Amino acid sequence: MDKHQRIPDVVIKRLPIYLRYLDQLSSMDIETVSSQQMGDDLHLNPAQIRKDLSIFGDFGVKGMGYRVSDLSEKLRSILGLDKEISIILVGVGNLGAALCQYNRYQSPTTKIVGLFDGHPSKVDKTIGNMKVKPMEDMQEFVKENGVKMGIITVPAQAAQKVADQMIAAGITVILNFAPALLNVPEEVKVQNSDVTTELQALSYYL
Amino acid sequence: MDKHQRIPDVVIKRLPIYLRYLDQLSSMDIETVSSQQMGDDLHLNPAQIRKDLSIFGDFGVKGMGYRVSDLSEKLRSILGLDKEISIILVGVGNLGAALCQYNRYQSPTTKIVGLFDGHPSKVDKTIGNMKVKPMEDMQEFVKENGVKMGIITVPAQAAQKVADQMIAAGITVILNFAPALLNVPEEVKVQNSDVTTELQALSYYL
DNA sequence: TAGATTGTTAATCGATTAACAATC
DNA sequence: TAGATTGTTAATCGATTAACAATC
C-alpha cells in the first residue's frame, strides 16, 4: 500500500461493484473468495482485482484468497460507507421524487435528508416522509447539517445555478441528473448521470 | 476515415455531449465553431475532439473550424438519431414511471413505446399516455414492433430474468438501472446506470 | 496573401494484463 | 509438504495529447 499515490476514478468505481458482489457471497454463507473466482463472476481480470485491492492494503491471504467479511468491511471503510452519509436533493419532479423513494429502500447508509425545489407549487409537498423545502432554506440547511453531497434533478437550464448554490453552501460532491455540463471549481467532484445522453450513446449500437 | 477500425466506447459516449453542445450553439445562432472553442467550453482537449470526429469523416474546414449545423447533422446520423428509436421499459415502479415521463419531454427521437411489469397490480395502470402491459405480452410486442432497445427498472433480483426475456425477444441493447450484473451474450450491449452504486462511489470523495 | 485551424502522426501517459517470486 | 493464490513487477495495450504539414 502506498498512501501517496493518486487513485484513479476507474478504480473507485469498481469498489462498490466488489462490495455488492461480496454481500451476495455473504448472503450465501460463502466465507472466502479468490480473485480468480471474483473475476469469473464479475467478468473482470483477476490481476486487475488484486491490483485494485492492493492499492488500499494487503487484504488477501496467500494460497487462500480473501475473507469475504473482512474484505467487505475494508471496502466499506475505504468508501466511507461505514457511517451514514447525508445528502440533499434539489428538484422534486418525477425523477427527483422517484430517486428519493428509490434510495430509501436501497441504501441505508447513503441517506437523502433534505428535499428542495425552486418552484412554489412543489414546496411543502411530502415525498416519502419528507417535506419539500424552498430553495431559500437550502444554504442554511446544508450548513447546519454538515451536508457535503447533493443530487441535482432540475431541468437543464436551472442546473448550473443550483450547482453554484450548492457549492456556495458547502457541498463538495454532486450527482447531476440534468443534461447539462456543470462548471465547478476543481475541488468539487461532479458525476453526471443523464438518461437522455445514455440513450443517445446506446443508439449507436443498434 | 477508416471504416475498418473498432471505435472505442469512450468515443461514442462523447458524441452525444458534442451534439448537445452544438444544439446550444445553434440556438444562439452561432454558425461555426473551432475544436479549440469546443474544448474550452466542454473542458476537453481540442486534439481529442478533432480525433474523435475524424474517425467518422472530414467534417471540418481547415482555417475555419466546423459548421455547427453540418456537424450536428453528421453526429445525429452516426448515432442513428436521425430516425425514431423504439424502446420498451420493464418495471413500472417509481423509477420506471419517472423515466418514462422524463423521456417524453426530453427526447423526441428515443421513444418509449411499451411499458411492461410482472406484477399484476401494475398492469393496466396508465403512465403518460401508455397502458402498462403484462410481461407475457412482451415478446410478441417486441417482435411485432421491431424493438431493439430495452430499459430495465425492476428490482435487482428480477433483473437477470427480465434481461433474458428481452434478449430472447430480440432486444440487443439494454439500459439497466437495477443494481445487478447482467450476464448477456457477447453481441448484446448493456449499459449499467445504477444510482446506488454511483452514490457509493461518490462517497469516497467526501 | 497571412492567419487560422484542420486532420494526422508521433510521443506520452495511464490502465490492463501476464508472469512469477513469496508465502499461506 | 505440495498446491493455491496473493501482491507486485514488467510487458502490453489503448487512449490522450502535442506537434505540425496541409490547406482553407
Image (tube, coloured by chain):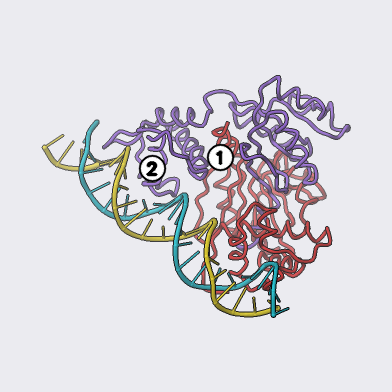
Chain colours: A red, B purple, C yellow, D cyan
Q: Which quadrant of the figure contains the C terminus of chain B? A: bottom right
Residue at x-position 78% and y-position 49%: A131
SS at mark 2 in the image: helix
Are marks 2 and 1 in one subunit?
Answer: no
**Percent position of residue B199, x then y:** 67, 55
- Amino acid on which disc 1 is placed: Gln
- Amino acid on which disc 2 is placed: Lys
Q: Is residue C1 above or below residue B196?
A: above
Say whether marks 2 and 1 touch (CB < 8 Å): no
Nearer the observer, A126 or D13 = D13
Q: Which mark is residue B51?
A: 2
Nearer the observer, A196 or A157 = A196
Tell me the residue that label 1 is attached to: A157
* Mark-to-mark CA distance, 2 and 1: 30 Å
**Chain under callout 1:** A
Q: Which mark is residue A21?
A: none
**Chain under callout 2:** B
Q: Is residue A154 above or below residue B28?
A: below
Q: Quadrant of residue B202?
A: bottom right
**Percent position of residue B56, x then y:** 41, 34
SS at mark 1 in the image: helix
Q: Quadrant of residue A196?
A: top right
Nearer the observer, A191 or B4 = B4
For marks 2 and 1, give the one nearer the viewer: 2
Q: Residues within 10 Å of mark 1 (few under 14, many from 20)?
A: few
**Percent position of residue B71, x then y:** 41, 31
**Percent position of residue C16, x then y:** 54, 56
Q: Which quadrant of the figure contains the N terminus of chain B? A: top left
Q: Is residue A177 above or below residue D5?
A: above
Residue at x-position 82% and y-position 50%: A129
